[in-house]
Image (cartoon, rainbow, N blue to C red):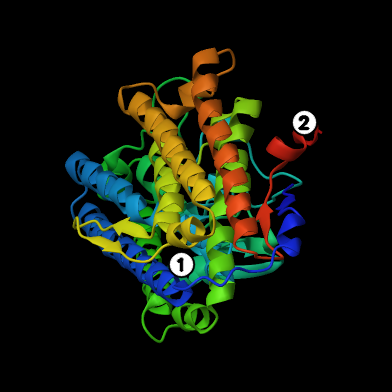
Amino acid sequence: MKTTLAISALACAIAAPALAGKPEVVANYVAIAHASYDDSLTTARELQSAIDALIADPSAQNLTAARAAWKAARVPYMQTEALRFGNAIVDDWEGKVNAWPLDEGLIDYVDPSYGGASDENEYAALNVVSQKSFTLSGNQLDAAKITPELLSDTLHEADAIEANVATGYHAIEFLLWGQDLHGTDHGAGERPWTDYAQGEDCTGGNCDRRAAYLKAAADLLVSDLEWMTAQWAEGGEAATALTADPDAAISAMLTGMGSLSYGELAGERMKLGVMLNDPEEEHDCFSDNTHDSHYYDGIGIRNVYLGEYTRVDGSVVTGESLSSLVAAADPQIDASLRAGLNDSVAKLARLKTVAEAGTSYDQLLARGNQDGEALILAAVDSLVSQTRDIERAVNVLGLQDIGFEGSDSLDNPDAVFQ
């Protein structure tokens, strides 16, 4: 259960300082958001092309290329997550493209140890790939043709169960890697390329339908990102709303930073996994790419504050920033927050370095791995500390009615085990 970390009442007592440059800060934020989603769209299209190549010519080489394209696509997308919590247009949409964790048995075959339907989710092992028709919510459905519409309109979050994730990056991830059955030992999913082979070479059964599902999911990801990119372009709904009300936009920027930093990343994505020693709490659990996703979340938070974003082509979008507003009001708070953001990114980078050197994130979560726990919790503590500085920035800017997402893992640890 998530809670809300409310900003101190001190904010209500401080008159908003008359700071010049708010419209320019917001305009730069919108430009960064548009560039981030545009890069996400570009890399999603490259992933789509790699998936088309895999389906047309199944091979170990083409599966490896599709996996690499998936990882590359995560780099710009994860940097957009700091836009979520302060912008309803993003938060309401985000579940289509990045929802997790998921009951992967909804989509395709799973190991017998996975189990089957449960009281919490009767579709946990539905295996749409294997069935041309099935009953869902009391209705018999024709699934002879797997289409983007079937995934998005019928399967995704079926019966309002969040674990029924049928679309987005993680559905594609599962279809490229398969389940990670290594627990807290080293190793990611090991789906064979022959799961996409045709005829006698097909493994796992239903290779044609598996390919159709993967194709539909990739096409849907691209169309969803096309839509969101347009919202941040000139005249788009997100861009227009924010530039029309710079004060509300500044609040949205800080809300997104604080909520991702505290409740979402430090809490739900990191502290909870350590408490449960559970590799299922990894954000990218099939590919063992969690270290990268956490790192680029941290980069995304810092991007918003510094007003800078490095595009996938190496060019930089930059301009007036939150940092300049806070520095004008209180240079010490700005300096402290800058230092905190750099510290959290450094600690997340340390996790990335360790994982890329051969100790995967799920190994760090293993019960009794004190060094691994210490590495993760150092990043958690840094994220929590920087959130306090974000609160101070909110206060010094005289903003009101801002709340950050919380997490039981941080706010009420005993509730995690109830």
The one nearer the camera, 173 or 321, is 321
Q: Amino acid at mark 1?
A: Ala
- Of the two numbered discs 1 and 2 in the rendering, the one whose residue sits closer to the viewer: 2
Q: Report how far apart the C-alphas of labels 1 and 2 lie in the structure.
A: 42 Å
Residue 384 image offset from top left, x and y in percent: 60, 39
At mark 2, the secondary structure is loop
Camera-nearest residue between 118 and 49:
49
Q: Residue furthest bottom?
A: 235
Q: Quadrant of residue 215?
A: bottom left
Q: Kindly tell me whether residue 132 is visible in this rendering.
A: no
- Give how far across and how far down residue 42 sits, in percent: 26, 64
Does 358 sit left or right of 144 as displayed?
left
Quadrant location, the C terminus: top right
Which of the 4 image quadrants contains residue 357?
A: top left
- Give residue 120's position: percent from left, percent from top: 74, 47
Q: Which mark is residue 33?
A: none
Callout 2 crowding tier (Cα within 10 Å): few <14, some 14–19, many ≥20: few
Question: Quick one: label 1 or label 2, which is nearer the N terminus?
Answer: 1
Identify the mark at residue 417; answer none if there is no mark.
2
Residue 292 occupies which quadrant of the picture?
top left
- Spot occupied by residue 71 in the image (x, y as percentages of width and height): 32, 46
Q: Which residue is mark 1?
A: 144
- Can the viewer see residue 243? yes
Q: Residue at x 74, y 50 (%)?
A: 3
Q: Residue at x 69, y 62 (%)?
A: 159
What amino acid type is highlighted by mark number 2? Phe
Q: Residues within 10 Å of mark 1 (few under 14, many from 20)?
A: few
Residue at 67%, 69% in the rendered image: 139
Q: Secondary structure at mark 1?
A: loop
